[in-house]
Image (cartoon, rainbow, N blue to C red):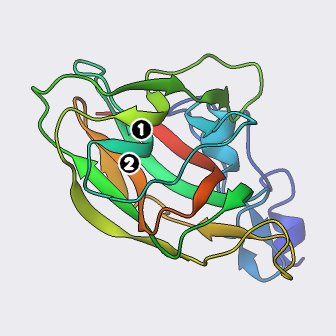
Amino acid sequence: MDVFTTLRGLVGLRNYNGDQEVNFRAGRQGQIISDPYGRFYQVAKDGFLWHAVTTDAGVAPGTDSVATTQAVSLYNPPGSNVDLVVLCARLAYNSGTLGAGEMLWTKNTDSAAAAPTGTAMVVSAGRLGGGAGVAVALQAATVPAAPTLLRVFCSLDASLASSVVGPWVVPDDVWGSIIVPPGMSVNLAADAAAGSTPLVAISLCWAQVPQ
């Protein structure tokens, strides 16, 4: 009798909820450790994953990444008792003429400072129909103080709608390397030339993890 036959009935996951016991997934070569439905399936299934995207009008990327105006801001309110674990972000061209430069992640870490203000982004649970979560996602955000640079997101070319380039989306798969505790925010803004009324679309994806 081979391993697969011996483990018949023990292959796959039981109904999973919180810390309930699960069976190992086994195949002919032993335990299966690959993601069965994708990297973030389980966190979305359990109701801990959210997306936010700028409105269809887009947002100006900005010109000074350490100014108090940021293209987008993801804020974790004080007392939320969760960490926001950033998983990925995307940037795409919308309209106007981009100024050459770079897009940067920035941070505000004074948990006693005032909350950022701005225009609400469109927020959706990863498992569609879920609640709004606790995070505040804003575009054209004003943060309470000049932020600190965190890491590079991407380069920006001096391009416009008539430029001879294919459609593009710039991904940044953060994969949990940025964690936003309560009272803090992570932001995106450009350090670039002004261009001419440039607008981009930005989306964020994060998990909300109890502390």
Image coordinates of residue 207 in percent, x first then y, are 50, 41
Q: Return the residue nearer the eye: 124 or 28.
A: 124
Residue drawn at x 76%, y 36% as measured from the top left:
56
Inspect this view and state whether residue 209 appears. no
Q: CA distance from mark 1 to mark 2?
A: 6 Å
Q: Is residue 206 visible?
A: yes
Name the residue nearer the viewer: 181 or 203. Answer: 203
Q: Which residue is mark 2?
A: 187
User: Are discs 1 and 2 less than 8 Å apart at CB?
Assistant: yes
Residue drawn at x 52%, y 44% is 206
Badge 2 crowding class, 10 Å Cα cut-off, few under 14, some 14 to 19, many 20 or more, is many
Q: Give the SS element for disc 2.
A: strand
Callout count = 2
Residue positioned 65% across, 45% down in the render:
42
Q: Position of residue 38 (x, y in %)?
A: 74, 59
On residue 74, which mark appears? 1
Label drawn at residue 10: none
Q: Position of residue 16 (x, y in %)?
A: 66, 34
Left or right: where 143 falls relative to 4: left
Amino acid on which disc 1 is placed: Leu
Q: Nearer the viewer, residue 115 or 7?
A: 115
- Identify the secondary structure beneath mark 1: strand
Tell me what residue is drawn at x 87 percent, y 58 percent: 8
In the image, residue 84 sits, relative to residue 192, either above or below, namely above
> Residue 103, image x and y in percent?
46, 66
Location of residue 27 (image quadrant): bottom right
Tell me the quadrant of the picture where the N terminus can be found.
bottom right
Residue 32 to residue 210: above or below: below
Residue type pointed to by label 2: Asn
Q: Earlier in the sequence, mark 1 or mark 2?
A: 1
